[in-house]
Image: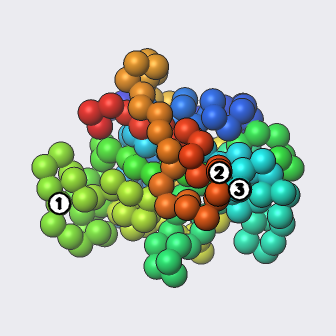
Amino acid sequence: MKEFKLLKREFFLKDTKTVARELLGNYLVRKSSIGTMIGMIIEVEAYLGPNDKASHSYKYKKTERTKIMYMKPGTIYIYLIYGLYYCLNVITEPEGQPCAVLIRQVFPIKGIDLMIENRNVKIGKNFKNLTDGPGKLCIALEITKDNFNGKDSCSSNSKLYFAHGEMILDEKIIVGKRIGIDYAEEDRDRLLRYSLKDN
């Protein structure tokens, strides 16, 4: 059986765009009391903190919610959208520089039956509608603000972490605009979404 080796803090310490691009092909691992669920990361978005109007920490804004973004790289940041869905992010760059990468989509690898049970919906070909969106993947992998916000994904005993996967060549990556950030004025057009071709 393949070993899923933890990504160390140095991985997340880099420039946010680099981390976002390099997360593609790596794995998201969720250990639960009833089994382990794993997905390959196939779509992400970069949020560039104080210099990005789409970021919660634009101009170094710091609130009870965003204080997590100022923590050490590799820290998990989870927030609620539309009052319904959680979004999973990982903090990047040196501590105090509040940047993050949003995990938008994973391709199921292990624990697929558990994911389907958690989602409780009809799944299409190639697991369409299972984990193809930030809210969907959080439901499928049982990721909530209560159980993981502010936790360290680089800890050896973490129940939610990132693991080494495949190296993805540049020609297999699509770069585009982020989704659902019309409020961000000119920053909404920045090319900070990275996804695998034919994912």
Q: Report the amino acid beneath label 2.
A: Glu
Q: Residue at x 30, y 52 (%)?
A: 111
Answer with the quarter of the image where residue 192 lies: top right
Mark 3 or mark 2: whose residue is earlier in sequence: 3
| Residue at which label 2 appears | 186
Q: Report the amino acid beneath label 1.
A: Ile
Contact, mark 3 vs mark 1 (Cβ under 8 Å)? no
Looking at this view, name the residue that lies furthest to the bottom: 83
Q: Residue at x 27, y 33 (%)?
A: 198
* Real-space Cα separation, disc 3 to disc 2, in angstroms: 8 Å
Looking at this view, name the residue that lies furthest to the front: 186
Residue 126, how many percent across, how many down?
A: 18, 46
* Real-space Cα separation, disc 3 to disc 1, in angstroms: 35 Å
Answer with the quarter of the image where residue 88 lies: bottom right
Image quarter hosting the C terminus: top left
In front of the other: 141 or 64: 64
| Residue at which label 1 appears | 123
> What colour scheme was applied to this rendering of the protein?
rainbow
The numbered dot on residue 53 is 3
In front of the other: 190 or 39: 190
Q: Is residue 161 left or right of residue 73?
A: left
The nearer-to-camera label among 3 and 2 is: 2
Residue 68, how many percent across, how many down?
A: 75, 61
Q: Label 2, secondary structure: give it.
A: helix
Neighbor class of circle 2 (other Cα within 10 Å; few <14, some 14-19, many 20+) is few
Q: Label 3, secondary structure: give it.
A: loop
Residue 139 position (above or below residue 162): below
Neighbor class of circle 3 (other Cα within 10 Å; few <14, some 14-19, many 20+) is some
